[in-house]
Image: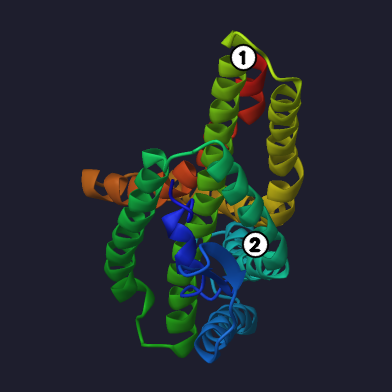
Amino acid sequence: MNPKLLSILRYQRYLGLTDLDFFDSLMLYRLHSTWLSIATQLLVVGLFLSALVATLAESLYYMDTQSQTGNTFDNAVMLATAASQLLANLWFRSQQEAQVALLQRLSQLARRFQFQFMPQTRCLDRVWMAVCLFYGAMVAGFSPHWLTGMQLSHAITLLGFAARCIIANFQITCYCGMVLVLQGLLRAQVEQLEGLLSSASISTADLAGCLRAHDEILLLGQAELVAVYGGVLLFLSVYQAMQCVLILYISNLEGFKSINEMFFILGWMAPMVFYLVLPLVVNDVLNQVSLR
Protein backbone atom coordinates (compact mmCIF):
# COMPACT_ATOMS: atom_id res chain seq x y z
CA MET A 1 0.00 0.00 0.00
CA ASN A 2 1.39 3.37 -1.04
CA PRO A 3 0.73 5.88 1.79
CA LYS A 4 1.17 8.80 -0.59
CA LEU A 5 -2.01 7.85 -2.48
CA LEU A 6 -1.18 10.27 -5.32
CA SER A 7 2.43 10.96 -6.22
CA ILE A 8 1.47 14.15 -8.09
CA LEU A 9 0.40 15.88 -4.85
CA ARG A 10 4.01 16.65 -3.99
CA TYR A 11 4.16 19.17 -6.85
CA GLN A 12 1.72 21.50 -5.08
CA ARG A 13 4.54 23.14 -3.16
CA TYR A 14 6.60 23.74 -6.29
CA LEU A 15 3.66 25.31 -8.13
CA GLY A 16 2.93 27.78 -5.33
CA LEU A 17 -0.46 26.32 -4.40
CA THR A 18 -0.24 25.01 -0.83
CA ASP A 19 2.25 24.04 1.88
CA LEU A 20 1.32 20.35 1.62
CA ASP A 21 4.23 17.98 2.22
CA PHE A 22 4.65 14.26 2.85
CA PHE A 23 6.82 13.20 5.78
CA ASP A 24 8.39 9.82 5.07
CA SER A 25 9.38 9.30 8.71
CA LEU A 26 5.77 9.75 9.88
CA MET A 27 4.17 8.30 6.72
CA LEU A 28 1.58 11.06 6.57
CA TYR A 29 0.73 14.41 5.00
CA ARG A 30 1.23 17.65 6.88
CA LEU A 31 1.46 21.36 6.14
CA HIS A 32 5.07 22.47 6.13
CA SER A 33 5.64 26.14 5.33
CA THR A 34 9.17 27.18 4.35
CA TRP A 35 10.70 30.35 2.94
CA LEU A 36 10.91 28.65 -0.45
CA SER A 37 7.24 27.63 -0.48
CA ILE A 38 6.13 31.12 0.63
CA ALA A 39 8.33 32.78 -2.00
CA THR A 40 6.93 30.48 -4.70
CA GLN A 41 3.36 31.30 -3.71
CA LEU A 42 4.09 35.04 -3.77
CA LEU A 43 5.78 34.69 -7.16
CA VAL A 44 2.78 32.89 -8.65
CA VAL A 45 0.31 35.41 -7.21
CA GLY A 46 2.48 38.29 -8.43
CA LEU A 47 2.61 36.84 -11.95
CA PHE A 48 -1.16 36.51 -12.25
CA LEU A 49 -1.77 39.93 -10.70
CA SER A 50 0.71 41.48 -13.14
CA ALA A 51 -0.99 39.75 -16.07
CA LEU A 52 -4.37 41.00 -14.86
CA VAL A 53 -3.12 44.59 -14.49
CA ALA A 54 -1.41 44.48 -17.91
CA THR A 55 -4.62 43.33 -19.59
CA LEU A 56 -6.69 45.97 -17.81
CA ALA A 57 -4.22 48.77 -18.55
CA GLU A 58 -3.98 48.19 -22.31
CA SER A 59 -7.22 46.33 -23.11
CA LEU A 60 -5.26 43.50 -24.70
CA TYR A 61 -6.78 40.80 -26.87
CA TYR A 62 -5.15 37.84 -28.58
CA MET A 63 -6.35 38.58 -32.11
CA ASP A 64 -8.21 41.39 -33.85
CA THR A 65 -11.61 39.90 -34.71
CA GLN A 66 -12.61 42.94 -36.79
CA SER A 67 -15.60 43.54 -34.52
CA GLN A 68 -16.12 45.38 -31.25
CA THR A 69 -18.07 42.50 -29.74
CA GLY A 70 -15.41 39.94 -30.65
CA ASN A 71 -12.55 42.09 -29.33
CA THR A 72 -14.45 42.76 -26.10
CA PHE A 73 -15.04 39.04 -25.55
CA ASP A 74 -11.39 38.31 -26.41
CA ASN A 75 -10.32 40.87 -23.81
CA ALA A 76 -12.72 39.32 -21.27
CA VAL A 77 -11.11 35.93 -21.87
CA MET A 78 -7.65 37.40 -21.29
CA LEU A 79 -8.87 38.97 -18.06
CA ALA A 80 -10.41 35.65 -17.03
CA THR A 81 -7.06 33.90 -17.63
CA ALA A 82 -5.47 35.57 -14.61
CA ALA A 83 -8.61 36.27 -12.58
CA SER A 84 -9.98 32.72 -12.69
CA GLN A 85 -6.63 31.21 -11.76
CA LEU A 86 -6.15 33.67 -8.90
CA LEU A 87 -9.56 32.75 -7.50
CA ALA A 88 -8.93 29.03 -7.98
CA ASN A 89 -5.55 29.26 -6.22
CA LEU A 90 -7.02 31.33 -3.40
CA TRP A 91 -9.76 28.72 -2.88
CA PHE A 92 -7.22 25.89 -2.96
CA ARG A 93 -4.94 27.69 -0.51
CA SER A 94 -7.80 28.44 1.90
CA GLN A 95 -8.78 24.75 1.91
CA GLN A 96 -5.32 23.28 2.45
CA GLU A 97 -6.10 22.18 6.02
CA ALA A 98 -9.27 20.46 4.78
CA GLN A 99 -7.18 18.77 2.11
CA VAL A 100 -4.76 17.43 4.72
CA ALA A 101 -7.67 16.08 6.80
CA LEU A 102 -9.11 14.44 3.68
CA LEU A 103 -5.79 12.81 2.81
CA GLN A 104 -5.29 11.58 6.37
CA ARG A 105 -8.69 9.88 6.38
CA LEU A 106 -8.17 8.39 2.95
CA SER A 107 -4.80 7.00 4.07
CA GLN A 108 -6.43 5.38 7.10
CA LEU A 109 -9.09 3.77 4.92
CA ALA A 110 -6.44 2.63 2.45
CA ARG A 111 -4.50 0.89 5.22
CA ARG A 112 -7.68 -0.72 6.52
CA PHE A 113 -8.69 -2.16 3.14
CA GLN A 114 -5.10 -2.90 2.02
CA PHE A 115 -5.71 -0.55 -0.90
CA GLN A 116 -3.01 -0.70 -3.54
CA PHE A 117 -1.64 2.15 -5.67
CA MET A 118 -3.81 2.68 -8.77
CA PRO A 119 -1.95 2.76 -12.13
CA GLN A 120 -4.74 4.98 -13.55
CA THR A 121 -3.55 7.86 -11.37
CA ARG A 122 0.01 7.50 -12.68
CA CYS A 123 -1.43 7.65 -16.20
CA LEU A 124 -3.12 10.96 -15.34
CA ASP A 125 0.20 12.29 -14.05
CA ARG A 126 1.94 11.43 -17.30
CA VAL A 127 -0.84 12.99 -19.36
CA TRP A 128 -0.48 16.22 -17.37
CA MET A 129 3.28 16.28 -17.94
CA ALA A 130 2.81 15.55 -21.65
CA VAL A 131 0.27 18.37 -21.97
CA CYS A 132 2.67 20.75 -20.20
CA LEU A 133 5.36 19.94 -22.76
CA PHE A 134 2.85 20.21 -25.60
CA TYR A 135 1.64 23.63 -24.46
CA GLY A 136 5.25 24.74 -24.03
CA ALA A 137 5.84 23.98 -27.70
CA MET A 138 2.58 25.72 -28.69
CA VAL A 139 3.44 28.85 -26.67
CA ALA A 140 6.91 28.91 -28.21
CA GLY A 141 5.32 28.79 -31.65
CA PHE A 142 2.83 31.54 -30.77
CA SER A 143 5.31 33.86 -29.03
CA PRO A 144 6.88 35.40 -32.19
CA HIS A 145 3.41 36.61 -33.23
CA TRP A 146 2.45 37.82 -29.75
CA LEU A 147 5.76 39.40 -28.71
CA THR A 148 6.06 41.76 -31.67
CA GLY A 149 7.78 44.90 -30.42
CA MET A 150 8.73 43.12 -27.17
CA GLN A 151 6.09 44.92 -25.10
CA LEU A 152 6.33 44.09 -21.41
CA SER A 153 2.54 43.68 -21.13
CA HIS A 154 2.53 41.04 -23.87
CA ALA A 155 5.39 39.12 -22.26
CA ILE A 156 3.67 39.13 -18.86
CA THR A 157 0.31 37.98 -20.24
CA LEU A 158 2.00 35.20 -22.21
CA LEU A 159 3.81 34.00 -19.07
CA GLY A 160 0.52 34.18 -17.17
CA PHE A 161 -1.22 32.10 -19.83
CA ALA A 162 1.54 29.47 -19.80
CA ALA A 163 1.52 29.29 -15.98
CA ARG A 164 -2.25 29.04 -16.01
CA CYS A 165 -2.15 26.05 -18.39
CA ILE A 166 0.27 24.20 -16.11
CA ILE A 167 -1.39 24.97 -12.78
CA ALA A 168 -5.03 24.64 -13.86
CA ASN A 169 -4.47 21.27 -15.52
CA PHE A 170 -2.55 20.16 -12.43
CA GLN A 171 -5.47 21.01 -10.13
CA ILE A 172 -7.93 19.17 -12.36
CA THR A 173 -5.57 16.18 -12.45
CA CYS A 174 -5.40 16.16 -8.63
CA TYR A 175 -9.19 16.21 -8.37
CA CYS A 176 -9.61 13.37 -10.88
CA GLY A 177 -6.95 11.33 -9.09
CA MET A 178 -8.76 11.77 -5.77
CA VAL A 179 -12.00 10.61 -7.38
CA LEU A 180 -10.24 7.50 -8.70
CA VAL A 181 -8.89 6.80 -5.20
CA LEU A 182 -12.42 7.06 -3.76
CA GLN A 183 -13.67 4.67 -6.44
CA GLY A 184 -10.89 2.22 -5.59
CA LEU A 185 -11.73 2.40 -1.88
CA LEU A 186 -15.39 1.72 -2.66
CA ARG A 187 -14.43 -1.36 -4.67
CA ALA A 188 -12.17 -2.56 -1.86
CA GLN A 189 -14.96 -2.02 0.67
CA VAL A 190 -17.44 -3.95 -1.47
CA GLU A 191 -14.99 -6.84 -1.80
CA GLN A 192 -14.56 -6.92 1.98
CA LEU A 193 -18.33 -6.85 2.47
CA GLU A 194 -18.81 -9.72 0.01
CA GLY A 195 -16.14 -11.67 1.87
CA LEU A 196 -17.92 -11.13 5.18
CA LEU A 197 -21.28 -12.19 3.76
CA SER A 198 -19.83 -15.33 2.20
CA SER A 199 -18.05 -16.44 5.37
CA ALA A 200 -19.51 -19.22 7.51
CA SER A 201 -19.76 -17.03 10.61
CA ILE A 202 -20.69 -13.39 10.14
CA SER A 203 -19.47 -10.98 12.78
CA THR A 204 -22.02 -8.26 13.45
CA ALA A 205 -19.30 -5.85 14.56
CA ASP A 206 -17.23 -6.41 11.40
CA LEU A 207 -20.31 -6.03 9.22
CA ALA A 208 -21.34 -2.78 10.94
CA GLY A 209 -17.78 -1.43 10.65
CA CYS A 210 -17.67 -2.24 6.94
CA LEU A 211 -20.99 -0.47 6.33
CA ARG A 212 -19.85 2.55 8.32
CA ALA A 213 -16.72 2.69 6.17
CA HIS A 214 -18.94 2.67 3.07
CA ASP A 215 -20.89 5.67 4.36
CA GLU A 216 -17.68 7.46 5.30
CA ILE A 217 -16.22 7.05 1.81
CA LEU A 218 -19.39 8.48 0.28
CA LEU A 219 -19.32 11.37 2.76
CA LEU A 220 -15.71 12.13 1.91
CA GLY A 221 -16.63 12.29 -1.76
CA GLN A 222 -19.78 14.36 -1.30
CA ALA A 223 -18.54 16.80 1.35
CA GLU A 224 -14.78 17.02 1.95
CA LEU A 225 -13.73 16.50 -1.67
CA VAL A 226 -16.25 19.10 -2.85
CA ALA A 227 -15.09 21.54 -0.17
CA VAL A 228 -11.48 21.28 -1.34
CA TYR A 229 -11.97 21.20 -5.12
CA GLY A 230 -15.48 22.58 -5.71
CA GLY A 231 -14.54 26.23 -6.11
CA VAL A 232 -11.40 25.33 -8.04
CA LEU A 233 -13.36 23.38 -10.66
CA LEU A 234 -16.00 26.12 -10.91
CA PHE A 235 -13.51 28.90 -11.70
CA LEU A 236 -11.41 26.77 -14.02
CA SER A 237 -14.36 25.32 -15.94
CA VAL A 238 -15.82 28.77 -16.62
CA TYR A 239 -12.54 29.89 -18.15
CA GLN A 240 -12.06 26.68 -20.14
CA ALA A 241 -15.52 27.09 -21.66
CA MET A 242 -14.86 30.78 -22.49
CA GLN A 243 -11.55 29.94 -24.13
CA CYS A 244 -13.07 27.18 -26.27
CA VAL A 245 -15.88 29.52 -27.40
CA LEU A 246 -13.31 32.20 -28.31
CA ILE A 247 -11.22 29.78 -30.39
CA LEU A 248 -14.30 28.55 -32.23
CA TYR A 249 -15.44 32.14 -32.81
CA ILE A 250 -12.09 33.25 -34.21
CA SER A 251 -11.82 30.10 -36.33
CA ASN A 252 -15.26 30.76 -37.79
CA LEU A 253 -14.26 34.34 -38.71
CA GLU A 254 -10.89 33.49 -40.20
CA GLY A 255 -11.66 30.08 -41.64
CA PHE A 256 -9.09 27.37 -42.19
CA LYS A 257 -6.61 28.70 -44.73
CA SER A 258 -4.45 25.58 -44.60
CA ILE A 259 -4.32 22.13 -43.05
CA ASN A 260 -1.48 23.32 -40.77
CA GLU A 261 -3.65 26.13 -39.41
CA MET A 262 -6.47 23.69 -38.71
CA PHE A 263 -4.13 21.41 -36.75
CA PHE A 264 -2.76 24.44 -34.89
CA ILE A 265 -6.25 25.48 -33.77
CA LEU A 266 -7.20 21.93 -32.84
CA GLY A 267 -3.95 21.71 -30.88
CA TRP A 268 -4.97 24.68 -28.73
CA MET A 269 -8.46 23.31 -28.15
CA ALA A 270 -7.85 19.60 -27.60
CA PRO A 271 -6.22 19.83 -24.12
CA MET A 272 -8.79 22.42 -22.99
CA VAL A 273 -11.70 20.22 -24.03
CA PHE A 274 -9.99 17.18 -22.50
CA TYR A 275 -9.60 18.81 -19.08
CA LEU A 276 -13.07 20.31 -19.31
CA VAL A 277 -14.62 16.88 -19.85
CA LEU A 278 -12.27 14.76 -17.71
CA PRO A 279 -13.89 15.55 -14.32
CA LEU A 280 -17.28 14.58 -15.74
CA VAL A 281 -15.91 11.30 -17.10
CA VAL A 282 -14.22 10.10 -13.91
CA ASN A 283 -16.88 11.36 -11.50
CA ASP A 284 -19.13 8.28 -11.50
CA VAL A 285 -18.79 7.27 -7.84
CA LEU A 286 -22.54 7.30 -7.24
CA ASN A 287 -23.14 5.25 -10.38
CA GLN A 288 -20.72 2.60 -9.13
CA VAL A 289 -22.51 2.55 -5.78
CA SER A 290 -25.91 2.04 -7.42
CA LEU A 291 -24.51 -0.74 -9.62
CA ARG A 292 -23.17 -2.53 -6.54
Decide: few, some or many residues near mark 1? Use Cα within 10 Å; few <14, some 14-19, many ≥20.
Answer: few
Query: Nearer the observer, disc 2 or disc 1?
Result: 2
Above or below, comparing residue 193 to residue 60 in the picture: above
> Along the horizontal axis of the image, is 54 left or right of 136?
right
N-term mark: 2 or 1: 2
Numbered circle sitting on residue 100: 2
Residue name at image x 62 percent, y 59 percent: 73
> Residue 8's quadrant in the figure?
bottom left
| Residue 255 appears in the picture as rendered | no
> Along the horizontal axis of the image, is 260 left or right of 245?
left
Instruction: Tell me where residue 271 appears, x and y as whole percent.
Output: 41, 48
Residue name at image x 47 percent, y 56 percent: 4
Report, in whole angstroms, how far the alpha carbon at label 2 lies from the one at label 1. 30 Å
Q: Nearer the viewer, residue 215 or 19?
A: 215
Numbered circle sitting on residue 111: none
Q: Which three-letter amino acid code belongs to the residue tagged 2? A: Val
Decide: few, some or many residues near mark 2? Use Cα within 10 Å; few <14, some 14-19, many ≥20.
Answer: some
Per the image, the residue denoted by label 1 is 291
**What kind of element bears circle 1?**
helix
Instruction: Tell me where residue 161 appears, x and y as whole percent.
Output: 47, 69
Q: Which three-letter amino acid code belongs to the residue tagged 1? A: Leu
Instruction: Tell me where residue 54 appears, x and y as whole percent.
Output: 57, 83
